[in-house]
Image (cartoon, rainbow, N blue to C red):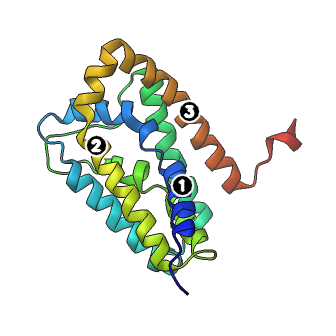
Amino acid sequence: MEIQFVNILSTFMVLFAVIDITGSIPIIIGIKKKAGKDFYPLKITLVAYAMMLLFLFVGEPLLRMFGVDLSSFAIAGSLVLFFLGLELVLGHEFFKYEASKSVGIVPLSFPLIAGAGSMTTLISLRAEYTVAEILIALSLNLLFVYLVLRATRFFERILGDAGIQILKKFFGIILLAVAIKLFLSNTGINLHHAA
């Protein structure tokens, strides 16, 4: 099957929407402030990229090996996202960051960039597109992720402290909503029927 530009574009847009790195800018700025000099955009991007590549090729069999299904994996990811959202909205610190070269791997590489949503999306994309098309789209997405991680100082200057605080609260609520939706859709709870 040949590689088609339209398919790459479609795959890119799906992954771009799921990863939503632009929506994570307030989180990235907050983590960078805590990390100080120990913030490594390239390392964060490469870890997320490696995790997503691994999941693209061996995700389902790997989870099955541990006796975990996709729904359970998604629920676990949703809980991490939920606490991250609470941290943004309430200003209370749930994730502790110690000075080390792994700062930002959690929660940026996982579950923010390579989260349950993006990983399950990769598996579902395999049913419709070629592996080569998915790989190109994924690589372009992660290149964009790296550029956003590198540009945090620029965003800080543009937004200012007040702007960052407003965005933090706003995206914190969005993140909470995404986490709840991910949790409910994977537990089979339907609030519309319950009402």
Residue at image location 75% in from the left, 55% down from the top: 188
Rendered residue at 28%/35% (across/down): 31
Snapshot quadrant of residue 103: top left
Identify the mark nearer the N-term, 2 or 1: 1
- The answer to whether 67 is drawn above or below residue 188 in the figure is below
Look at 55% across and 87% down and name the residue there.
1
Q: Which residue is mark 1?
A: 13
148 left or right of 17 in image? left
- Of the pair 3 and 139, the residue shown nearer to us: 3
Q: CA distance from mark 3 to mark 2?
A: 20 Å
Binning the other alpha carbons within 10 Å of mark 2 as few (below 14), some (14 to 19) or many (20 upward) gives many
User: Between marks 2 and 1, how big is the CA–CA gap?
Assistant: 19 Å
Q: Earlier in the sequence, mark 3 or mark 2?
A: 2
In the rendered image, residue 9, in percent from the top left (x then y), is placed at 52, 61
Q: Kindly check if marks 2 and 1 are in contact, taking CB atoms under 8 A apart as contact.
A: no
Answer with left or right where residue 32 lies relative to residue 65: left
Q: Nearer the viewer, mark 3 or mark 1?
A: 1
